[in-house]
Image (spheres, rainbow, N blue to C red):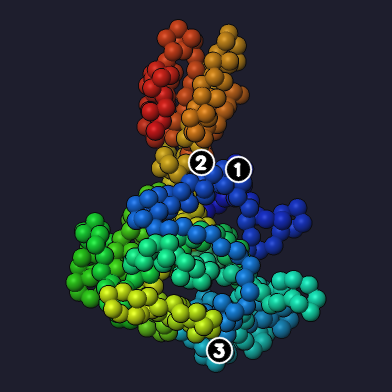
Amino acid sequence: MVREKIMDISLRRGFVWPSFEIYGGVRGFYDYGPLGALLKKNIEEVIRRHYIIEEGCFEVSSPTLTPEDPWVASGHVKSFSDVIVECEKCGEPYRADHLVAEHTGIQTDGMNISDLKEKIRDAGIVCPKCHGPLGDPYDYNLMFKTYIGPGKRKITAYLRPETAQTTYLLFKRLYAAGRERLPLGVLQIGHSFRNEISPRQGMLRLREFTQAEVQFFVDPNNKNSDRFDEVADLQIRVWSGEMQARSSEPKEMSLREAVESGITKTQFIAYSLGRAWSLFERMGIKGSRLQMRQHKDDERAFYSSDTWDIEYISQDFGRIELVGVSDRTDYDLRSHMELSKVDMRVNKEGRKFIPHVVEVAYGIDRPFYCTLESSYVEQTGEKSRTYFKFPRDVAPYRAAVFPLVNKDGIYEKARTVYETLKNLGFYVQWDSSGSIGRRYARADEVGIPFCVTIDYDTLRDSTVTVRDRDTMKQERVHIKQLASRLS
Ligand code: GAP
């Protein structure tokens, strides 16, 4: 299984590690090690380039610990829950819909507590761990609850389960800062928390994770995009709600076709999906493994008029939702307006209205894993090796610098090259131990795109050897041209 090979490299070399390991660990938490932290940072930077630089979005950053009111308004206090069922013998908790789906193969989207109770009874499902009987299913709120402040003055609070709501609370200020333009896009990258019932899929279902959610505030009378033509011809595997209802396979089509045939309800949604698609390719996730799947009517949140996920088809995990794109209508701003009594309407060309929100909600941890899986290459034959074919801007390090030998002034020269590259802002790794072959193998294993070797010729003519990770070809480059070659 690729997953095991990736996890082996990951643990050994420092991409991700299970959290709190020396105390036995807790499911649903991962630490990013030295390489993982850099890879994650680079994935976030690709997102920033895509939305802040190219789309002109704003970025905000809000507290993760929030008072209760926003979550009352958004509906999370009342209904951000999953149905849980516990073993009466060993106490193991399960997500009831997942348990039923795994045992019966039926689709459980949209099932309520009594449907799930009935299915568990009819299928005779018992605890998969100890075969004990299961108790009655019940609703379980996924938010972590806590308090802000001491004693009688303390107020109820929650760790945010999504970044979105914290962005909506800023709408009035953002609208003014953006000189009252619509559409107005706002990105927020930060941690979110969900007390998931039984996170069993490694880093795909976490209790603390990073989201990068973009909220586009749009005019409800204009859900087109000026830039739709940029993505219109992208050929994408599309799985509409209607196709799923008649059990038909996803179909490849252009986004233009998806809009013109009414499969996506608005052009803005199609545009957002196209942009998300190209973003994943930029991260190194294979487009051939992606599909866009529409939420069926019984699955979609009641306030949403159209919701799509982009899913990655993983070799070991099957379908993984990487991003949700949703037309949330005016639900969120209206709800905050009603509870806070702050007017969220805008005044445009004689019309007073609450903007609608089209949300593009990325997680970071799942794309992180899929980047690893998509980039992992096992090369067989004479030159067998394994490497990560990360795109250059995503790779944790841009280059590794090696002195051919640690004597005759070569070590010192290599240190100078290494320091110069660092001063120019490159993330570079130093490796001076073992044979050059072993150093190449170590650099390949963690996906470093270039290896720079300083040798005797360097002392004579100021050139270095640059070896390309993917082709393994080597070329001589003058030290003065090295930075532009690595760029
Ligand atoms: N604001 C909308 C929202 O939060 P979501 O589909 O629940 O929508 C968006 O989450 C993205 O966040 C998902 O597509 C996924 O990538 C990521 N995500 C959600 N729950 C997660 C979890 N428990 N662990 C890791 N990533 C998660």
Q: CA distance from mark 1 to mark 2?
A: 9 Å
Q: Amino acid at mark 1?
A: Pro
**Going from the N terminus, do you reach mark 1 or mark 3 first?**
1
Does residue 300 appear in this view?
Answer: no
The percent position of residue 456, horizontal first and vertical second, equals 49, 10
Closer to viewer: mark 2 or mark 3: 2
* Front-lying residue, 118 or 343: 343
Q: 71 and 285: which one is in front?
A: 71
Q: Is residue 64 visible?
A: yes
Which amino acid is tagged 2?
Pro
Q: Position of residue 112 (x, y in %)?
A: 51, 88
Dot 2 or dot 3: first in sequence order is: 3
User: Element under label 3?
Assistant: helix
Residue placed under numbered mark 2 in the picture: 396
Q: Tell me which label, 1 or 2, sits earlier in the chain.
A: 1
Quadrant in which the C terminus is drawn = top left
Report crowding for label 1: few under 14, some 14 to 19, many 20 or more residues within 10 A (C-alpha).
few
